[in-house]
């Protein structure tokens, strides 16, 4: 397929990005019988092979196939002409034979070639390159290549290496035409679109060819938009100011001509309907063809297998549309009849949410203005997170739905209020829920559930704002939710990533009052969603006791939280409770308890929550690293101060910033430390997060002291003092150890009568004791660590995959794209890999892996 055939109006590339990682693969492939390069047009397949063979000191036969080559006589002549330039002797042998249609004829041709002494002595290995292989539909021609491959494997003197280039996947390429075992037939290298896709650094190199420098963030955006498809990236780089619609139109015409319009109408409809899934299986294809013939299923499956813009994962046994092709299919959705559109979207609700592409589904509902279906789907979607980048756009669309329709479909207004909550506009969310309640007739049965759900959300908003809610109202409406709340996920919002303990601002309330309130709140929620918040009351009570350094009670309630929450699968509560137990062990200098609680918490995390709470676990690991002054366990994103790591988890931002800031503090990078404290301040001024707000003031005092701004340091410390003094909370200061002592001493030297010096003296003594216990544990830890021989650990297959990609120079984002997992999922795998290998960072892990031949 020539470029002029599929993008006639777009400029030719001015240069090509070299891919040493692929060239390295090709250089080792000569030891195999065959190399197949299977990818759609625009992946640089032909250019790659051209550059590669230029470096080879071997004779080349290059055939660029056309549909005419389906005629055996024409193909045989094409092969003879292709061999004439570099292998005239082979060309002569081809001319003396006719196209071999039988095994005997093939054997005669091969023996003539093998027994020719001139060929054997003059050439040795021969490289046969077949381009545009997908154009071959005549099985006689394809069998010729299969037989050549087979004989080459069995008969050593025939030293031919085949390179087959195709714009489609070839499902039968490694199937033996004769009785050859599968293992033998797999002596080949397969390069796919995933291999040929450009990574971030290669995208930057591509743009430099066009005289443009782009930052990593922009390259990352382009990678996500194009999945590294060189064709689209070349056009964008050639003229990034051009009309994007023209570019997309050109690409869509390519898809329409070669990878959609040439399929049957029924197959087109099935492909279009599959866009509602993130990935799909053979069964989903079967479900969509169940009312049709078996032939349609087989035909559609074969097309899907051959389509180079549809990827198949042998690990999860699922197909996935590459992003540009998926976007094209979304555009075709609107050509379906209205009845088919509604049926497609409605049928999606019968599949698990994990398999659905929620953003695509909502986009289709929106663009087709299918308000009826949308309002039903919102109820199903409510408990799930909508990615942050999509919230505002989704919100704006819902607000544009005609008011008369929203008045008769109040779930839409409920979801609008919920989206404000997810966007962290808590006051706006609260106002929207109250307005919705006021607009509904509470005597109407169909509205009772919405009212009940709204009060649940108002209670949750109060928790998020660190304020009190009139729980008598919630108790009054519990009967409206006898089947449970659809908002169960949000009930644990405040205690997953950030501290659950808080004290309401501007209210005269004691810690015990708050413990009683949370106990009552937890009971109410458990009445609605059974044991949804099981253990939360114990966790809150435990953290409250920790704040005042009552370690015995804190430990008791933390253990109760672990017990109750683990029974009901409240993983976030369990991990937070274990975190409290570990912090208590540090505070007491009890190394034995520390090991026990750390081991138990880590075991629980790995067994039940490896993907759900990996970021929270990263933060915990970093905190323990700070305590021990052992930074090997601190994840890379925390060391880098990567706040974008939480870009799609706006409701969880808080402790992640503190972890990044503390690492900068330990590294004595005070400008970066102050910048991160500023970031934390922006979060705590718009939300509750009471302990984080106290910590924010404390960190400001430390930062200003390092910046020689004494007055500001004292003012910041006073803010924290005002929040905690009457409650006798000291642990938030003590945890900072030697970093907080200078500011405490400074305040005491000032002799300011505003402060209770006895309290400050007690705080200083407690902090020194805490530091002493940390030093004791540090000594034991490093002694134990240094006295043990390195432990040999076994990486899981998935961890080996991640590590292998890391050794190839891929970034976390590129590894995520390669394995079809999230970036945070990659980071979790990397954290486990670092731990098992004893690596400090990515570079260290690569060094260890390569030197020990792990991958």
Image (cartoon, rainbow, N blue to C red):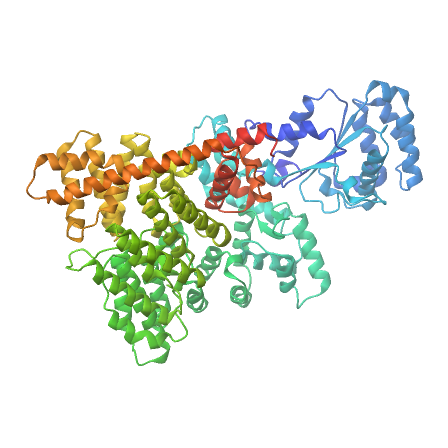
Residue 286, x across and y down, in percent: 65, 62
Residue 413 appears in the rendering? yes
Residue 747, x across and y down, in percent: 13, 37
Give the residue displayed 66% in from the left and 32% down from the top: 46
Is residue 281 toward the left or the right of residue 237 in the image?
right
Could you say which quadrant of the image residue 418 lies in?
bottom left
Give the residue displayed 68% in from the left and 66% down from the top: 292
Q: Nearer the viewer, residue 539 or 93?
A: 539
Could you say which quadrant of the image residue 398 lies in?
bottom left
Residue 153, x across and y down, in percent: 82, 35
Is residue 652 toward the left or the right of residue 373 in the image?
left
Number of callouts: 0
Residue 574, x across and y down, in percent: 40, 56
Query: From what the image shows, is residue 378 above or below residue 206?
Result: below
Is residue 213 toward the left or the right of residue 143 in the image?
left
Q: Nearer the viewer, residue 695 or 214?
A: 695
Query: From what the image shows, is residue 558 above or below residue 409?
Result: above
Residue 398 appears in the rendering? no
User: Which corner quadrant holds the N terminus?
Assistant: top right
User: Which corner quadrant holds the C terminus?
Assistant: top right
Give the residue displayed 27% in from the left and 31% down from the top: 671
Query: From what the image shows, is residue 727 above or below residue 620?
Result: below
Q: Nearer the viewer, residue 543 or 849?
A: 543
């Amino acid at each position: 397929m020539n470029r002029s055939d599929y993008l006639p109006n777009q400029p030719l590339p001015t240069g090509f990005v070299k891919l040493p990682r692929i060239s390295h693969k090709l250089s080792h492939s000569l030891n195999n019988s065959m190399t197949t390069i299977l990818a759609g047009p625009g992946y640089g397949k032909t250019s790659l092979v051209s550059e590669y063979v230029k470096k080879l000191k071997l004779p080349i036969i290059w055939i660029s196939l056309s549909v005419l080559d389906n005629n055996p006589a024409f193909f045989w002549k094409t092969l003879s002409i292709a061999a004439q330039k570099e292998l005239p002797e082979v060309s002569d042998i081809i001319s003396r034979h006719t196209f071999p249609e039988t095994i005997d004829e093939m054997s005669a041709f091969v023996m003539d070639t093998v027994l020719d002494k001139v060929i054997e002595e003059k050439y040795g290995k021969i490289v046969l390159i077949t381009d545009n292989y997908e154009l071959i539909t005549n099985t006689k021609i394809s069998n010729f290549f299969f037989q050549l491959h087979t004989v080459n494997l069995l008969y050593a003197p025939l030293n031919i290496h085949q390179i087959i280039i195709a714009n489609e996947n070839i499902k039968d390429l490694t199937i033996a035409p004769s009785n050859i075992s599968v293992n033998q037939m797999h002596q080949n290298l397969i390069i796919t679109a995933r291999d040929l896709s450009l990574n971030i650094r290669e995208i930057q190199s591509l743009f430099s060819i066009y005289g443009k420098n782009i930052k990593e963030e922009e390259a990352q955006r382009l990678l996500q938009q194009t999945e590294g498809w060189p064709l689209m990236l070349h056009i964008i780089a050639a003229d990034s100011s051009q009309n994007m619609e023209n570019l997309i139109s050109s690409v869509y015409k390519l898809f329409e001509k070669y990878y959609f319009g040439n399929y049957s109408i029924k197959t087109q409809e099935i492909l279009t309907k599959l866009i509602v899934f993130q990935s799909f299986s053979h069964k989903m294809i079967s479900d969509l063809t169940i009312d049709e013939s078996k032939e349609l299923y087989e035909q559609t499956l074969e097309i899907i297998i051959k389509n180079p813009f549809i990827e198949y994962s042998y690990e999860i046994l699922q197909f996935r549309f590459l992003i540009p092709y998926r976007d094209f299919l979304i555009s075709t959705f609107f050509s379906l009849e209205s009845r088919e559109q509604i049926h497609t979207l409605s049928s999606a609700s019968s599949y698990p949410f994990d398999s659905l592409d929620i953003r695509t589904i909502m986009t289709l509902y929106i663009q087709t203005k299918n308000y009826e279906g949308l309002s039903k789907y919102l109820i199903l979607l409510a408990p799930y997170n909508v990615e942050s980048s999509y919230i505002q756009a989704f919100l704006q669309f819902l607000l544009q739905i005609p008011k008369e329709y929203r008045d008769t479909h109040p779930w839409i207004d409920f979801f609008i209020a919920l989206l404000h909550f997810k966007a962290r506009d808590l006051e706006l969310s609260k106002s929207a829920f109250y307005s919705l309640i006021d607009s509904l007739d509470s005597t109407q049965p169909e509205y009772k559930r919405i009212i009940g759900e709204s009060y649940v959300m108002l209670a949750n908003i109060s928790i998020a704002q660190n304020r009190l809610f009139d729980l008598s109202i919630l108790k009054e409406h519990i009967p409206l939710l006898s089947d449970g709340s659809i908002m169960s996920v949000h009930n644990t919002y405040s205690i997953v990533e950030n501290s659950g303990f808080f004290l309401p601002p501007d209210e005269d309330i004691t810690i015990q009052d708050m413990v009683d309130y949370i106990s009552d709140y937890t009971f109410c929620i458990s009445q609605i969603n059974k044991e949804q918040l099981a253990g939360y009351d114990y966790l809150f009570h435990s953290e409250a006791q920790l704040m005042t350094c009552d370690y015995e009670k804190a430990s008791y309630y933390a253990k109760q939280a672990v017990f109750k929450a683990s029974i009901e699968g409240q993983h976030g509560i369990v991990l937070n409770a274990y975190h409290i137990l570990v912090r208590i062990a540090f505070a007491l200098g009890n190394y034995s308890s520390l090991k026990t609680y750390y081991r138990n918490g880590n075991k629980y995390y790995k067994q039940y929550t490896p993907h759900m709470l990996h970021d929270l676990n990263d933060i915990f690991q970093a905190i323990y690293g700070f305590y021990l002054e052992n930074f090997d366990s601190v994840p890379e994103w925390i060391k880098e101060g990567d706040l974008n790591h939480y870009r799609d988890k706006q409701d969880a931002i808080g402790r992640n910033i503190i972890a990044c800031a503390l690492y900068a503090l330990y590294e004595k990078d005070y400008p970066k430390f102050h910048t991160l404290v500023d970031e934390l301040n922006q979060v705590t001024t718009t939300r509750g997060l009471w302990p984080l707000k106290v910590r924010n003031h404390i960190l400001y005092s430390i930062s200003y002291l390092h910046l020689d701004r004494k007055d500001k340091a004292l003012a910041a410390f006073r803010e924290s003092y005002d929040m905690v003094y009457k409650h006798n909370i000291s642990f938030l200061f003590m945890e900072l150890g030697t970093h907080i002592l200078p500011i405490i001493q400074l305040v005491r030297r000032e002799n300011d009568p505003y402060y209770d010096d006895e309290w400050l003296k007690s705080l200083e003594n407690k902090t020194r004791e805490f530091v002493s216990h940390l030093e004791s544990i540090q000594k034991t830890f490093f002694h134990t660590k240094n006295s043990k021989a390195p432990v040999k650990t076994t990486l899981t297959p998935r961890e080996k995959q991640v590590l292998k990609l890391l050794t190839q120079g891929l970034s976390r984002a590129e590894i995520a794209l390669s394995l079809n997992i999230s970036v945070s999922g990659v980071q979790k795998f990397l954290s486990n890999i670092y731990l098992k290998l004893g690596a400090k960072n990515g570079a260290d892990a690569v060094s260890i892996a390569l030197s020990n031949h792990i991958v």
